[in-house]
Amino acid sequence: MATPNAASTIVSQAFRFMEVTAPSSLGDQSTKATDANEQYPLALNACLEQEDFSFARRFAFLKLANTPEGEVVDPDLPNFHVLPKDCLKLRGLREKAIKWRIDGPYLLTDNAADIAIRYTRQITNETRLPALFQTAVSYQLAILLAPTYVASRTKRADLVSDGAAALRKAIDNDAVSASHARWDGMDEQGDWASEAIR
């Protein structure tokens, strides 16, 4: 959630995109501030979920946990691992041969050992977000608020189109954030296109 009483850049920009005057602050008790505070986390998380962004990427080891009270063991995936509290979206397991499934706050696996995962974490401090990503979140927030503040269907459609382009630009900007080697240590798979036309 955006910090109350803060002059959020993302919120201000969202209202500019809608061509509507922004609230004076997120804690001013106005309807606009209330609406922005309500929709801000949804807009931010929706954008974070779209891609494995480097600034939100985390690597972690999950310890094997006891079966939580009240949970029924799946015979195919009997091992419980508790996902990190800040885990917004699991991106993958280091060991590709492990079978897994997410059930609520748990990662169920067929491996009775610690598990190495890569995930996208939730972020609450917008100053840690790259500028292009902030713009994408502003558009997403504007899209969520538009039914209340934008009467024109054409303007609302433009926000959706411009928002998709802004998110694509943020994704492209973040694309060169690691070496070309696979993170899981496995062999490269090669170029699928050249393999397909052999």
Image: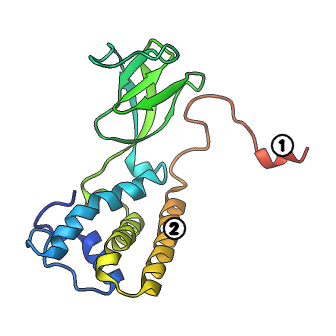
* Coloration mode: rainbow
Classify residue 142 as left or right of residue 124.
Answer: right
Q: How many marks?
A: 2
In x, y percent, where is residue 134?
Answer: 36, 66
Three-letter amino acid code of the residue under disc 1: Glu
Q: Secondary structure at mark 2?
A: helix
Residue on which the image places disc 2: 169
User: Which residue occupies 59% across, 26% down?
Assistant: 96
What's the residue at 76%, 45% (across, down)? 191
59 to 191, vertically: above or below:
above
Q: Residues within 10 Å of mark 1 (few under 14, many from 20)?
A: few
Image position of 55 (left or right of 181): left
Where the N terminus falls, by quadrant?
A: bottom left
Q: Which mark is residue 142?
A: none
Which residue: 11% across, 75% down? 30
Give the percent coordinates (x, y) of residue 155.
Answer: 43, 85
Q: Is residue 55 above or below residue 153?
A: above
Front-lying residue, 104 or 169: 104
Q: Quick one: quadrant of the C terminus?
A: top right
- Place residue 106 in its image quadrant: top left
User: Earlier along the polypeptide chain: callout 1 or callout 2?
Assistant: 2
* Kind of residue indicated by mark 2: Lys
Residue 20 vs 98, above or below: the answer is: below
Say whether residue 179 is left or right of residue 48: right
Q: Identify the residue at image location x=45%, y=26%.
A: 116
Q: What is the secondary structure assignment of the residue under circle 1?
A: helix
CA separation in Å, label 1 and label 2: 29 Å
Image position, residue 125 (x, y; %) = 24, 56
The numbered mark at residue 195 is 1
Spot occupied by residue 160 in the image (x, y as percentages of width and height): 47, 74
What crowding class fits label 2: few (fewer than 14 Cα within 10 Å), some (14-19), or many (20 or more)?
some
In the image, residue 32 sits, relative to residue 119, either above or below, namely: below
